[in-house]
Amino acid sequence: MTGGGDSAVEVRVRYPEVDRMGVAHHTVHFVWFEIGRTELMRRRGAVYAALEDQGIFLPVVGAECTYRAPARYDDVVRVRTAVTHARGARIGFSYRIERAADGALLATGATRHAAIDGRGRPRRLPQQILELLD
Amino acid sequence: MTGGGDSAVEVRVRYPEVDRMGVAHHTVHFVWFEIGRTELMRRRGAVYAALEDQGIFLPVVGAECTYRAPARYDDVVRVRTAVTHARGARIGFSYRIERAADGALLATGATRHAAIDGRGRPRRLPQQILELLD
Amino acid sequence: MTGGGDSAVEVRVRYPEVDRMGVAHHTVHFVWFEIGRTELMRRRGAVYAALEDQGIFLPVVGAECTYRAPARYDDVVRVRTAVTHARGARIGFSYRIERAADGALLATGATRHAAIDGRGRPRRLPQQILELLD
Amino acid sequence: MTGGGDSAVEVRVRYPEVDRMGVAHHTVHFVWFEIGRTELMRRRGAVYAALEDQGIFLPVVGAECTYRAPARYDDVVRVRTAVTHARGARIGFSYRIERAADGALLATGATRHAAIDGRGRPRRLPQQILELLD
């Protein structure tokens, strides 16, 4: 099971992230997901930049998002991230994006990752990392 | 059913789209999907910019991508797009991203869209547009 | 003259902002400049989103940046922004980007802006805004 | 002197590149500049991706742009690029962005680059590259 509950981080919608409809372009939610999982990992002691320096990369092998309400320019959004699984060379996260001002749900999503080394070969996540994340 | 087969467009991987791993960041595939459906629509006579000028917007309500192999800086990728459904105020597309040089499959994905007016209210797609896309 | 000193805001370098050289792509500095001037304006009581809602837009008419040292993935950078001029329908800002950890200077730059209305016609900035910024 | 005239490439304005004002965000012009110089180099036989594989990097040390008229969503813009200087470990480019439909001038700009090796140390550009570009 995945303990530790979720992790929240707040981000403000930037001007270039907003499109002609005046709302955050749908690709930006995946950037927020990435910020969400990076901060979750940092808080649990697994700094992603340090993992890469050790030759452990976690590319996205699957990503999905369902959009429920738009995020507007200059809104602060809250990204809630949870680990869904962390085993062997696989790890997954789920996300909720909320408008910080009133908690309204803006989007939900998930990503799946494969641990690889610097040459792109699968490698098990170190036990210590699995324990931090699981 | 959705006739007309798919539509292909080629795009070169740009320098700022590539990340520290030397490959296109996973958010870029959604930009390619958008280029794919825009060109499919253009070829069928439904120019998306003109639709917006008429007050018809097609925001993404769901998006997903499965990543199979990396796209590298300066690679040319081919985006193959097909309409999966087009009915009422709903339209969906599926995508395949291939490396143009050898046809290798890099990613597959799908997006779902809701037709809305300039105030964000659902509106049926005009019959003419549905016929062009279906 | 432009009083009030400068305004500082900190931003973390995001994964998709970093390129194949492992450093922030040179376009990202202009996004940081935009965050810098937006926060300077907010602190002085001129919320840019609210200006736009009143039909006052401040598009960039000139932008420049000199890059002195790279910003790396996950680094926190500090953006220092100052108003260089604010008169009539013209406003200018200067910027310094520093690495937050040690204060090292990473880049300097400037932007010039023209105040326009929603139809793209020049319009004087309201006296109240000029006083807040000058 | 720098012979060989300029080099032109056309690019379509993408949806996520357009902001709330309905025009290309000012950072996108620097991406177009990069596409412009990459294609100029490719046509002269100096493929930038191949240079990097040989350990020659050309980071931007200075960039500037003057914006004259907006580029709109789905417009095709033409990027005209010329080499301004290429000597030792230094190279510079100038750019003109035009609307392809009518040739209207949208922006002009310039970038300066320093040749470095994979460790960030200055290195002279190979004579062959200087000759191709100069």
Image (spheres, coloured by chain):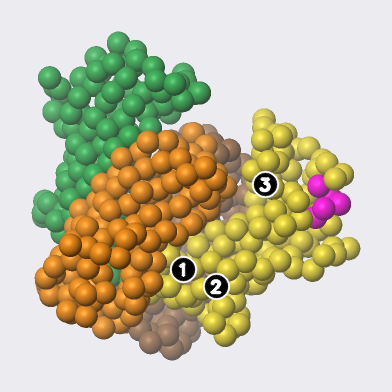
Chain colours: A orange, B green, C yellow, D brown
Q: Earlier in the sequence, mark 1 or mark 2?
A: 1
Residue depicted at 18% across the width and 70% down the height = A115
Q: Position of residue B56 (x, y in %)?
A: 42, 22
Q: Is residue B64 visible?
A: yes
Question: Badges 3 and 2: C-beta atoms under 8 Å apart?
Answer: no
Q: Is residue D129 magenta?
A: no
Question: Badges 1 and 3: C-beta atoms under 8 Å apart?
Answer: no
Residue depicted at 28% across the width and 16% down the height = B88
Q: Report the chain holding disc 3.
A: C
Query: In the rendered image of this protein, does residue D90 appear above or below residue D20?
Result: below
Q: Which amino acid lies under the numbered mark 3 shown in the image of this protein?
A: Tyr
* Total marks placed: 3
Q: Is residue D40 visible?
A: no
- Local crowd at mark 1 within 10 Å, few (<14), some, or many (≥20)? some
Q: Earlier in the sequence, mark 1 or mark 3?
A: 1
Q: Which mark is residue C77?
A: 2
Q: Report the chain holding disc 2.
A: C
- Local crowd at mark 2 within 10 Å, few (<14), some, or many (≥20)? many
Dominant SS type (magenta): helix
Residue on which the image places disc 3: C48
B106 or A35: nearer the viewer: A35
Distance in Å between CA atoms under marks 1 and 2: 7 Å
The magenta segment is: C129-133
Q: Which mark is residue C13?
A: 1
Residue depicted at 32% across the width and 19% down the height = B89
Q: Quadrant of residue C79?
A: bottom right
Q: Report the chain holding disc 1.
A: C
Q: Quadrant of residue C31?
A: bottom right
Distance in Å between CA atoms under marks 1 and 3: 23 Å
